[in-house]
Amino acid sequence: MDNKRIKIIHIINTLGIGGIERLVIELCNQLDPQKYDVTLVVLSNNKLDLKDNIAKHINLIIVPLKYKSSSFFDSLSLILNILNILKIFKELKPDIIHTHTFQYNIMPILLAIRITAKDASHFHTIHTFGIHYENKNIKHRIKLKIEDWWYNRCRTQIVCISPIIKKQIDVLFTKKTKPTIIICNGIDLDKFSNSSNLKHDSEIIQIAYTARLEHGKSHDTLLNAFSKLIKKYHNISLILIGDGLLRSKLELMAKDLNINNQVKFLGNCENVPMILANCNIGVFPSEFEGFGIALIEMMAMGLPIVCTDLPIFRVLQLNESNVLFFPSRNDNLLAQQIEKFIISEELRCEYTRKSVEYSKQFSIEDMLTKYDSIYKQSVS
């Protein structure tokens, strides 16, 4: 491999705007083109918001399938069209296949690897331990056993983005042929820290949350908390960055709470750093996270943070000294914590400094170095 580039295929479900999508694109873009011949395979053609963010030297292949909200039909569609995946693997002859797909999509890909890419090294990054790995019913446990079996058949190297995911995976997947490794997510700190120097010109205190409008992200808890705050403070607004299946329902909820004039649903945005630069407080009420890259981005922007007290955040050394916690789904305590930042500019400034300092440990450069190392080891 010393005299030729390593052929690597990254596989992802969509190019919709989200933490996983942005991270995978950043990884593909920044892998050294002198060392790697990179192809990005996208398993759907109806969520392509971030297509223009992909560097020109990346070979982009979009599988002509529609992403569906139903996991069953999405997976079934991929199985029925597996010839597309087989053709890609056969033509490209990759040295490495790295999947970042949702767990219900992984098994058709693993089958394709076994058929046409047996010699390729397979990496699979697990970006979350949400519903898929927390469901305890019998049907789901059987599904996990099958998934575990396929990982072993493909000699898959599982990568977890945090220690807490690794701990859970090591319990669920007991027959791994390779030990699970941890590579934490990273962000382009320059992009976010440079934007954080912009001035907050507005007299309105803007509260920001970046997340898909989907179950588990707890936007309803945030709207209820905000409705309590707006009764006391008229100089505040709520900025929601992201889109999803719950948008119309949440917009109706904001209207019913009579806060729709103070809540802005921005949808999917590419200029997230510029938007956050004009915000004053960051909130993160998600019910479960594998890492929370959007949270780190807000901290890099210098936003003081109110977030759910999740085990993952404790593992990542977030505590009461650098964020304000509240219990999951508790809108009363969420409102109380946000209020502390609303009424005290001094407290906001204190936690702004703490946010920026904390975020410095999660650089894209560090993440790339670790991936580069395991890639080279796999083909040596």
Image (tube, rainbow, N blue to C red):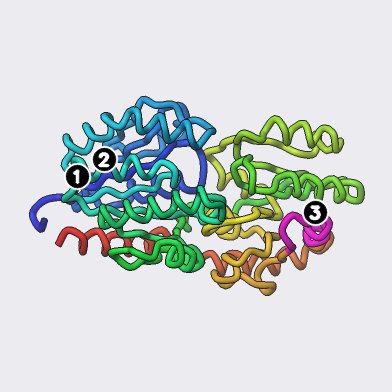
- At mark 1, the secondary structure is loop
The residue under the point 54% across, 69% down is 316
Q: Nearer the viewer, mark 3 or mark 2?
A: 2
CA–CA distance in space, label 2 to label 1: 7 Å
Callout 3 amino acid = Asp
- At mark 3, the secondary structure is helix
Q: Is residue 94 toward the left or the right of residue 282 in the image?
A: left
Q: What percent of the width, then of the height, locates residue 272?
A: 56, 44
The residue under the point 34% across, 40% down is 108
The residue under the point 79% across, 36% down is 254
Marked residue nearer the N-terminal end (2 or 1): 2
Residue range of the region highlighted in magenta in the rendering: 326-339
Task: Name the residue tied to disc 2.
Answer: 112
Q: Is residue 286 toward the left or the right of residue 156 in the image?
A: right
Marked residue nearer the N-terminal end (3 or 2): 2
CA–CA distance in space, label 3 to label 1: 50 Å
Q: Nearer the viewer, residue 100 or 196?
A: 100
- Badge 2 density bin: few <14, some 14–19, many ≥20, Cα 10 Å: many
Marked residue nearer the N-terminal end (3 or 1): 1
Quadrant of res 15: top left
43 falls in the magenta region: no
Q: Nearer the viewer, mark 3 or mark 1?
A: 1
Which quarter of the image is occupied by the C terminus? bottom left
**What is the number of the mark on residue 23?**
none
**What is the number of the mark on residue 331?**
3
Task: Find out whether the residues at labels 3 and 2 contact each other: C-beta distance under 8 Å.
Answer: no
Task: Please indicate, yes or no, whether residue 238 appears anywhere in the rendered image.
Answer: yes
Task: Name the residue tied to disc 1.
Answer: 117
Residue sitting farthest toward the left: 3
